[in-house]
Image (spheres, helix red, strand yellow):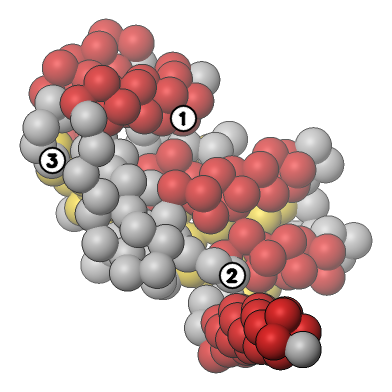
Amino acid sequence: MRNKTILLATAVMFAAIVFLFWQNDQQIYQDQGRLAVRVDPSDRDAVIFTWSSAIDVPMARRFEEAFDEWKGKTRRIVIELNSPGGSLSEGGRVVDVIEKMKRTHEVETRVGADGACLSMCVPIYLRGARRVAAPSSRWMFHQPTTRDFFTDEKVDEPAFETRMTARRFFKRYFVNSEMDPDWRAKLERDWQGGDVWKTGQELVDEGANVVMVLE
């Protein structure tokens, strides 16, 4: 009898935990991560997706939903970004969605005059076939950090793990991009243990081939 009671209590506790996770996910999807979508006034055959928030759930889902809605109505997708960065895993999913868009549509990425593209925002921006930014736009590159899933606090990890994570990130998002190889090599040296800040104008002046067009 006692064992049955323990098993029942364990099952109830597990069900409660599952429900709390589900409830939390539903709250995230309902109340956060709003993607603004509008037709480009300068090009009626283009639609603009604007994301002004952290790179976090449910960004990839929002982009995929918007693309599914608009893919038959336009030939060009313009992605406007203004983000402090965020989740590596969610950013990776967003990159995958953009690659899916590029199979059938032109994709342009933009960062405006009052905008910033920091940390994980940069790999997303780099997926644009045409990349536009304001001269005064702000950019930040740094080595990725591991964060606790529940608290979002930085997790201390052995130095070799940090180096491995940084190498994987660098190869996936920067080596496999149109970033200038010489500038990329300098970035890899400069970001050891610190943040690298640039403006859109500086990126163009330095020949980084991150920003293609200043507007």
The three-letter amino acid code for the residue at tag 3 is Asp
Frontmost residue, 102 versus 154 = 154
For label 1, the crowd category at 10 Å Cα-Cα, with few meaning under 14, some 14 to 19 and many 20 or more, is: some
> Which residue carries the number 3 mark?
195
Above or below, 199 against 23 in this view is above
Q: Which mark is residue 201?
A: none
Q: Is residue 126 left or right of residue 8?
A: left
x, y percent for residue 82: 36, 64
Residue displayed at 42% across by 55% down: 87
Split into 4 quadrants, where in the image is the N terminus? Answer: bottom right
Sequence-wise first label, 1 or 3: 1
The three-letter amino acid code for the residue at tag 1 is Tyr
- Marks 1 and 3, how far apart at CA: 17 Å
Q: Which circle, 1 or 2, is nearer the viewer? A: 2
x, y percent for residue 192: 13, 26
- Marks 2 and 3, how far apart at CA: 26 Å
- Is residue 9 at all visible to an observer of this figure? yes
> Which residue carries the number 1 mark?
173
> Which residue carries the number 2 mark?
58
